[in-house]
Amino acid sequence: MQLPSLFSALGLALVLGLTPLWALADDGHNHGEAPATAAGPALPRFAATSDLFELVGVLDGQKLALYLDHAGDNSPVKEAQLELDIAGARVTLTRVAEGEFQAALAAPLAEGVSPVTATVVAGTETDLLAGEIDVHAAAHAHAEPAGRRNALVAGAVGAVLLALGAVWGLRRGRAARVGGAA
């Protein structure tokens, strides 16, 4: 392999090895607004439904927010009375608005799945709802996005492999010339 061929091979190796880096868009070079992402791990929640009512509860530490709607049209249940039991313990609720309640738990819920039962009385309608809330510690709350890092590593590995192939080809060419001249 002649010297200009070596430089051509090394140049090609560099271009091909760095191509994945050029394909990445950074700030100001994207195609529109990025979709919204969650700022942290999702809060534990439960849902309990029946033919009449839908109840959703969201747990934030020891604070519990509850949303009670009609199953048919998803409108808040007006003037409802709600009794709640989580893992065998009765929870005292405070009405915040129509169909919205809140509670302060006496103690944090234990990790794992806990049964939830609710009794709803709204006018002449009464129903018993059941669900489960799954509480787990956020093990991977700060996971690092790996897409860009993986592309950088792949580009660098590709460039090194192509450069090694060019050097191997050069040495092979020299060996053929030396062997052919003898």
Image (tube, grey):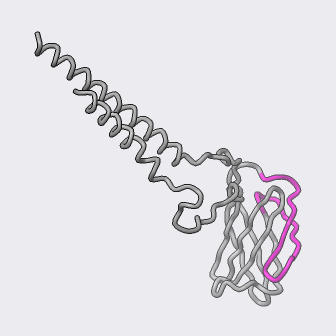
Residue lying furthest top:
182
**Horizontal placement of 154 versus 142: left or right?**
left
Residue drawn at point x = 83 percent, y = 74 percent? 101
Residue drawn at point x = 44 percent, y = 37 percent? 156
Q: x, y (%) of residue 27?
A: 59, 58
**Horizontal placement of 57 versus 173: left or right?**
right
Residue drawn at point x = 17 percent, y = 14 percent? 178
Residue drawn at point x = 71 percent, y = 53 percent? 135
Q: x, y (%) of residue 69?
A: 71, 81
Q: Is residue 26 magenta?
A: no
Q: Which residues are magenta?
A: 86-109
**Horizontal placement of 79 versus 24: left or right?**
right
Q: x, y (%) of residue 138?
A: 69, 48
Q: Is residue 94 magenta?
A: yes
Image height of 166 relative to 40, above or below: above
Q: Quadrant of the C terminus?
A: top left
Closest to the observer, 39 or 71: 39
| Residue 78 quadrant | bottom right
